[in-house]
Every structure is written in C-alpha cells, then in structure tokens.
Amino acid sequence: MLNIEDWGLIDYHDAWERQRYLQGRIQVGAANSTLVFCQHPSVITVGKDGSRDNILLPQSQWNERGIEVVHVNRGGDVTLHNPGQLIGYTLFRLSDFREDLHWFLREIEECIIETIAEFGLEGSRLDGFTGVWLEHCRKICAIGIHCARWVTAHGFALNVTNDLREFSYIIPCGIHDKEVTSVESERMRKSLPPVSLHEVQTVCAQRFIQHFV
C-alpha cells in the first residue's frame, strides 16, 4: 500500500525532520510507504557527493536573498528548491517492491517521464546521469535519494512553475554544460497554455500509484 501526503509549502528543515520521523516509522513497520508532495521556500542543498564549489552565489549574498545552504544525506551534488517546484519525497520500503536502488531510481524517472508526457513534453534519460531531461540537454527533474534498512528518503524535484533564474546561483548537479528547464518554460516554447502545479501533482500521484501499487 502507498500513502500519499501533501505538506504544502514547508520549510526545508521542518520537512527533513518529518521525513526522518516517517522513515523511522516505516522501518519498524508502523507506517506504510509514503509519497510526500511539497514545495520549499528558496534553499540550496548539497548532497553527500556534492561540492560547495558548485555554489556560485557568494556567501555574503545568501543572507541578503534569504537563501540557506543545507548539507543533506541524499546522493547527488548541489541543487536548488523554490516555490513552484514540485518536490516528491519517496519514503518507500523497497522490501515491499524490489531491493534494488538502481531499479528504484529508474522507476522514479519513468513516473516523471510519464507525468510530463501528459502535458505535451517528451522527457528522456541521459546516460551517466540521474534525472529527467528534454532533448538530452535541458534538465527538468533532479533526483537524489538516501536509503537505510531498505527504506528510502528524499526523492525528486520537478520544475513546474518555479523561477529558473535562481538556478544561476549554482552549477546544478555539478553539470557545467546543461541547462535547467521547467514544465512552464517548455510549454511556452510550444505555445501551449499554462498548467498549474496542482494539475501536475495530480497526474504525478496517479503515475506513482500505477507503478507502486
């Protein structure tokens, strides 16, 4: 069984604490696998494989912009979260599905690819990189997880209607030669009408249920 929760717009530290609590409950069998949707105020996170060298914004300007830099235990490098980006925290007991992290990452990618296809966008994978891309050069979704006792935490960040200008503060995922894009930006390229984050979230939830229930 897969539970789905919506935490709305929530401070990153508060969400991380709630994740750790829920992960612990799932590990001892007190809760089911849970997909959490939320958004965060602007924050830069650095994964366990990351480097602060990939943060371009001088530290003196972090406070001016109200942006915190947080080191976290997920895989991956540097990324940025801000309002309008759909965060999906995948707190899944893999023993109920398949004890294979590579398989799990590919399943998350597939759920995102199928989600954005509903909005006229053709997503794809890029060899050697985790996440979802358009035309192999514009990243629309970053993915990074942590796993303990076969229960995962963290998850994906799908750019929907968020301000992409803030990504100029970092080298996203430490990749120098690729762009960052969003559902909104790509639909504008195609002269398609705007969609809301809620619409994208609804479809995304359906895709995860199809893959994991």
Image: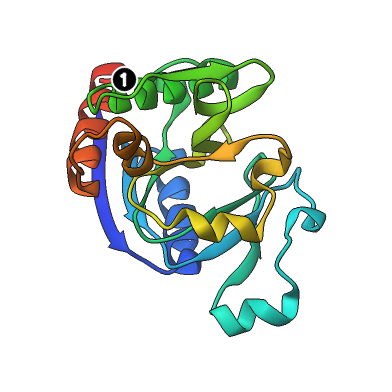
- Residue 142 visible, this angle: yes
Name above or below for residue 37 compared with residue 42: above
Q: Amino acid at mark 1?
A: Glu
Place of residue 152 in the rendered image (x, y in percent of width and height, measured from the top left): 51, 36
Place of residue 126 in the rendered image (x, y in percent of width and height, measured from the top left): 60, 19
* Color scheme of the displayed model: rainbow
Depth check: 123 or 34 in front?
A: 123
Provide the secondary structure element on which disc 1 rests.
helix
Name above or below for residue 98 compared with residue 171: above
In this rendering, the count of numbered labels is: 1
Examine the image and state in which quarter residue 117 appears: top left
Where does the N terminus fall, quadrant-wise? top left
Place of residue 90 in the rendered image (x, y in percent of width and height, measured from the top left): 42, 38
Q: Residue at x 34, y 55 (%)?
A: 84
Name above or below for residue 177 compared with residue 12: above
- Residue 99 visible, this angle: no
Q: Which residue is mark 1?
A: 114
Name above or below for residue 199 compared with residue 210: below
Q: Residue at x 47, y 15 (%)?
A: 98
Place of residue 4 in the rendered image (x, y in percent of width and height, measured from the top left): 24, 41
Q: Residues within 10 Å of mark 1 (few under 14, many from 20)?
A: some
Where does the C terminus fall, quadrant-wise? top left
Q: Residue at x 53, y 38 (%)?
A: 142
